[in-house]
Each structure stands twice: as C-alpha cells, then as structure tokens.
Amino acid sequence: MSLYHHLKTWLGKKREHPHEEETVALPEIHTGKVAHHTDADGTPAADKPIHYDNVAIPEVHIHPRRK
C-alpha cells in the first residue's frame, strides 16, 4: 500500500471525541399571554399545583462544534 492510501484511510476515519455529549432539559416558558379560566370549584387554573407526572419536558442535545 502506498503512503497516499494510508493517509487517506487514516484521515477518513471518524475521530473519537474526548468528551461525552450531554442532554439538557429545558423547562416550560410561560409568557402570561394565555387566558386562565376559573374551574368549577372557583380556583384559577394558574394557582393549582403542578403534577409533574404529566408535564412534558423537551430535551435538547448539544453537539460539539466542528472546526
């Protein structure tokens, strides 16, 4: 094999990153522009406690920059 072929295969290999990718969870952002209606018991929906078993939290994957 020629030196050109060795360099081509060596440079073509995918490099290992010395760090791991991290996953970041972002909370919901409320702008206050949504109308909150009062329930039958008289408590506004905005004042009720949040049950986190049914709240969707989006995930954002941050990948390293390529130079």
Image (cartoon, rainbow, N blue to C red):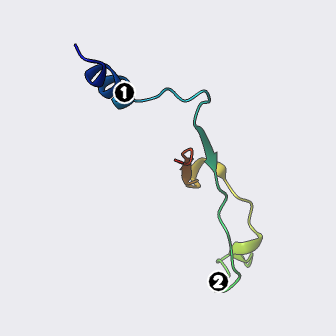
Res 12 → quadrant: top left
Tell me the kind of residue under disc 2.
His
Residue at left offset 63%, top offset 84%: 34
Name the spot of residue 58 as percent of width and height, x first: 55, 54
**Percent coordinates x, y for residue 8 in the rendering:** 31, 28
Residue located beneath label 1 in the image: 13
**Residue marked by disc 2:** 37
Residue 6 lies in quadrant: top left
Give the SS element for disc 1: loop
For label 1, the crowd category at 10 Å Cα-Cα, with few meaning under 14, some 14 to 19 and many 20 or more, is few
Q: Is residue 29 above or below residue 12?
A: below
Residues 14 and 37: in front is 14
Between disc 1 and disc 2, the foreground one is 1
| Image height of 61 relative to 22, above or below | below
Residue beneath the point at 63% across and 49% down: 25
- Whole-angstrom CA distance, mark 1 to mark 2, is 58 Å
Q: Amino acid at mark 1?
A: Lys
Tell me residue 18's x, y (percent): 60, 27
Describe residue 1's horizontal placement relative to residue 17 as left or right. left
Which residue is at 65% across, 50% downward?
A: 52
Residue at horizontal 24 percent and vertical 17 percent from the top: 2
Foreground residue, 11 or 4? Answer: 4
Mark 2, Cα crowd under 10 Å, few <14 / some 14-19 / many 20+, is: few
